[in-house]
Image (spheres, rainbow, N blue to C red):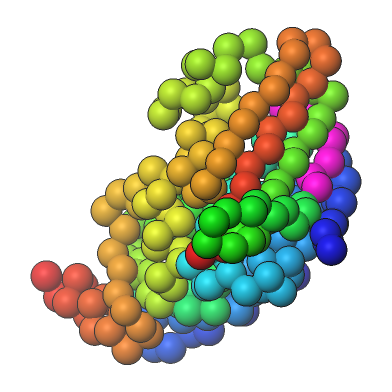
Amino acid sequence: MRIPILKLKNYLLISVQVDLDDQTALQFQEDLLNKIHQEGSFGVVIDLTSVEMIDSFIAKVLGDVVEMSNLMGAKVVLTGIQPGVAITLIDMGIVLDEVPTALDLEQGLDKLQQELEA
Amino acid sequence: MSVQSNVEVHSEWGIVSARQAGRNLAKELGFGGVDQARFTTAISELARNIYLYAEQGEIIIETVENSRITGVQRGLKITARDRGPGIKSIREVMEDGYTTSGGLGAGLPGVKRLMDEFDIDSVTGEGTEITAIKWLR
């Protein structure tokens, strides 16, 4: 399965609609980096509103893709992290270091704009 | 009546099946959203440990009951069983930050914090059985 990546001007928008399995997550990592490269995108919003569970592996893949995108010069904001997901990640001691987050897609886009203007 | 679900874990898909089975049972039993996330994540971590270290094993999810003065308490129990290499030092693996996989999993202390009860039984060269219970609040 592949996660669709939408282009909006200089941004890429992704809404993850399923709980990620390992293969899908790794495929997404690759697809996103390729898309950033192809489109020359400045910013990415990954919306996780529909994701009910993030385990340590998926958290690592997400954290890594943020860092990888930064290396390429694109800013990433994660949005819509559910209460259960936030609680579980902290319970497990997983820290998503320096990953910008926002409540929802709209605020995520605002945050990107701020980060890019700063 | 006790409900049970057994999932063989010998590939990444086993991890996905185990957590789906766990989520379904947690929903059925009436766990809230946050505890469903905790329970499903714990299963995912335990299934991943089996896949990473023992290559194959099974995850058993079943309903359990506990009689208390205030009434019968219900919960879900995970048993993660494998015939892998076993854990050399349980004390070490229960320390935060201990890893042999280079940080692929959050490790067992993380799982313990997600659950209410947690127990490891492991014999080097024979295998490991981890049981963990989450009680319905």
Q: Nearer the viewer, residue B109 or A57?
A: B109
| Residue B19 belongs to magenta span | no
Does residue A3 appear to the left or right of A77 in the view shown?
right
List the single residue furthest toward the left. A118
Q: Quadrant of the C terminus of chain A?
A: bottom left
Residue at horizontal 52 percent and vertical 62 percent from the top: B70
Side (left or right) of A90 relative to B5: left
Q: Is residue B23 left or right of residue B106?
A: right
Q: Is residue B26 visible?
A: yes
Q: Residue A88 versus residue B70: which sits nearer the camera?
A: B70
Q: Please tell me whether residue A117 is drawn above or below residue B97 in the rendered image.
A: below
Image height check: is B96 above or below A99? above
* Residue A33 in view, yes or no: no
Left or right: residue B10 compared with residue A112: right
- In the rendering, at what x and y percent does residue A2 appear? 69, 71
| Quarter the N terminus of chain A occupies | bottom right
What residue is rendered at 66% in x and 17% in y? Answer: B87
Between A8 and B111, the one nearer to me in the picture: B111
Residue B100's spot in the image, x, y percent? 57, 22
Query: Does residue A99 sit above or below B85 in this rendering?
Result: below
State the extent of the magenta-drawn residues as a range: B52-60
Residue placed farthest to the front in the image? B69
Please give the name of the residue rendered at 71% of the width and 19% of the height, measured from the top-left corner. Answer: B122
Where does the image place residue A72, in percent across and percent down from the top left? Answer: 38, 56
